[in-house]
Image (tube, rainbow, N blue to C red):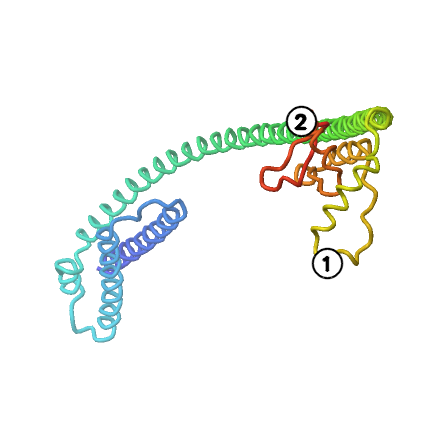
Amino acid sequence: MAESTNQTINEVCAISNLTTEIIRHREVCDKLHQDLGLPRFEEKHLSREKSVRMQLLKSRKTIVKELINSEKTKSTPRELYLTELATSPVLSLSKLSNNVERSVNENEQLSDELKQQIKKEQEKVDKLDDLLYEHKKTQESLKVMLQGVIDQQQNLNDEQNTEEEEEEEKNKNKKKKKKKKKNKNKKDGEEKEKSNYEKIESKLKNQIEETKEKNSLIISNMIKFTNKFFEMPTETNEKEKETRKRKRKKQEKKKKKAKKPLSLGKILELLFESATNEPELKWIDSSPFWKPFVELLDRSGVIEKNPKNPSLVRLAFDLN
């Protein structure tokens, strides 16, 4: 009977140790799952294993306690105690053994699944390593290509800047040449205009001098002609003057004697000189002239009288 009791105690201790090992192995598997990012075991298996463990520990404590009490009292037969212990619904060894075997099978199944999952994850990791290597290789090639493109772009920018500077320099040179040419043409035009103006001015001066000489020659010839063919008034004409003077008022008697009348040549000279003035200044007063000379020039068509004031006369033709 003592051997049977010891065997039972040994079985209970072995089952307890096995359960502890299974739980420890389960914790290791959970940690691996957690490290790999895999889903954890189902809570129902954990709770079942925990309950089995608690039952085993409780049964172990109970058996040990009962054995100690039986050794002290000697009042209860060991066969009855072992029978009660074997037939107890809570501490049934066969039931506990079945639960432990089922847990072991589930643990082995989960271990196999875990190994397969680890193998798949390892394959994925290998594939990821290959992809990472290809990615790094592609990244390096892209960096080299990008650096080449950047260098090429920099070269193109430098060439473009150089071309723009050359083009700007050419445009500046063109503008300078154009401005210089324009200034030269302007200067040449001014010099040409000035030379033309000087030529015209000298030509006009020459023409004026020639005209003055011709005018002086004509006036001198006219004076000679008039002095030769139109003599000054004689003494008989002085009587007419005396007659006109008597008709004047008494106050005019106190005035000086009248000036000597102008000759026909002097009258023509005055008319020629006034002909070169402005149109409103061409008229001259004919009252100081001798009336026979004025009438002679009027009948000859040399002079014309002012319609508003007949005493004003001028040349009938324009010398300008």
Q: Quadrant of the N terminus?
A: bottom left
Name the one closer to the observer, 70 or 87: 87
Instruction: Return the residue at label 1.
Output: 250
Q: Is residue 5 above or below residue 33?
A: below
* Residue at the (64%, 35%) spot, across then down: 305
Q: The residue tagged with tag 1: helix, strand or loop?
A: helix
In the image, which disc is placed on residue 188?
none
Q: Which SS class for mark 2?
A: helix
Say which of 200 and 154 sits in front.
200
Q: Nearer the viewer, residue 22 or 39?
A: 39
The disc at residue 299 is 2
Q: Amino acid at mark 1?
A: Lys
Which residue is more in the foreground, 143 or 313? 313
Identify the residue at image location x=77%, y=56%: 253
**Location of residue 64 in the rendering, given as x and y in whole percent from the top left corner:** 26, 66
- What is the residue that sits farthest to the bottom in this orientation? 73
Marks 1 and 2 sit apart, C-alpha to C-alpha, by 35 Å
Q: Residue at x 68, y 26 (%)?
A: 317
Tell me if 300 is positioned left or right of 100 in this view. right
Residue 241 spot, x, y in % from top left: 76, 44
Kindly report which numbered mark, 1 or 2, lies closer to the viewer in this rendering.
1
Rendered-image quadrant of the C terminus: top right
Q: Position of residue 159 (x, y in %)?
A: 68, 27
Q: Are marks 1 and 2 in contact (CB under 8 Å)?
A: no
Tally of marks: 2
**Would residue 85 appear left or right of 193 to someone viewing this image?**
left
